[in-house]
Image (cartoon, rainbow, N blue to C red):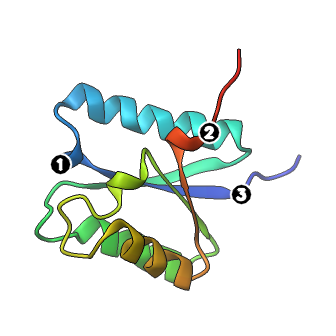
């Protein structure tokens, strides 16, 4: 049995309008991980834009673990209302620590 690599998730609750959208965003991460051959690990959910605590926790896990893949629902989830920086800056922080970053919405599915 081959072990699938782990993929971490990151979602900004403040980028969504309701709990149903948050659930749908998380579901999109699960579907992406499965379709791309990953096991979805922790999904970090940012609830306070002023703190960016979830992003910093995600970055800490990338730094200290063997997990070097992150998925977000859309690239807008990086940086949306964040004190951690723009989407490009947040992505650079992750990539600096050898984490590849994907957006679940960029995957084209065919029936």
- In the image, taking residue 23 as reference, residue 41 lies left or right, namely right
Q: Tell me how far mark 3 sits from mark 1, CA to CA.
A: 29 Å
Q: In this rendering, does residue 64 appear at all? A: no
| Residue 44, picture quadrant | bottom left
Measuring from the top left, give residue 29's x and y in whole percent.
50, 41
Report if the CB atoms under discs 3 and 1 are less than 8 Å apart.
no
Identify the disc placed on residue 5.
3
At 23% from the left and 70% from the top, the residue drawn is 53
Label 2 vs label 3, nearer the camera: 2
Mark 2 vs mark 3, CA separation in Å: 18 Å
SS at mark 2 in the image: loop
Q: Is residue 102 left or right of residue 85?
A: right
Identify residue for label 2.
107
Image depth: mark 2 or mark 1 in front: 2
Q: Which mark is residue 14?
A: 1
Is residue 37 in view from this perspective? yes
Q: Who comes first in sequence, dot 3 or dot 1?
A: 3
Image quarter of residue 75: bottom left
Whole-Å distance between the Cαs marked 2 and 1?
Answer: 23 Å
């Amino acid at each position: 049995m081959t072990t699938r690599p782990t993929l971490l998730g990151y979602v900004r609750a403040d980028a969504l309008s309701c709990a149903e959208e948050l659930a749908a965003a998380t579901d999109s991460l699960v579907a992406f991980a499965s379709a791309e051959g990953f096991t979805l690990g922790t999904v970090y959910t940012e609830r306070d834009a002023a703190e960016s605590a979830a992003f910093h926790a995600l970055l800490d896990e990338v730094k200290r673990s063997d997990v070097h893949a992150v998925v977000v629902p859309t690239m807008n989830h990086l940086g949306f209302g964040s004190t951690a920086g723009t989407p490009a800056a947040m992505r650079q922080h992750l990539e600096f620590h050898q984490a590849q970053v994907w957006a679940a919405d960029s995957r084209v599915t065919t029936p």
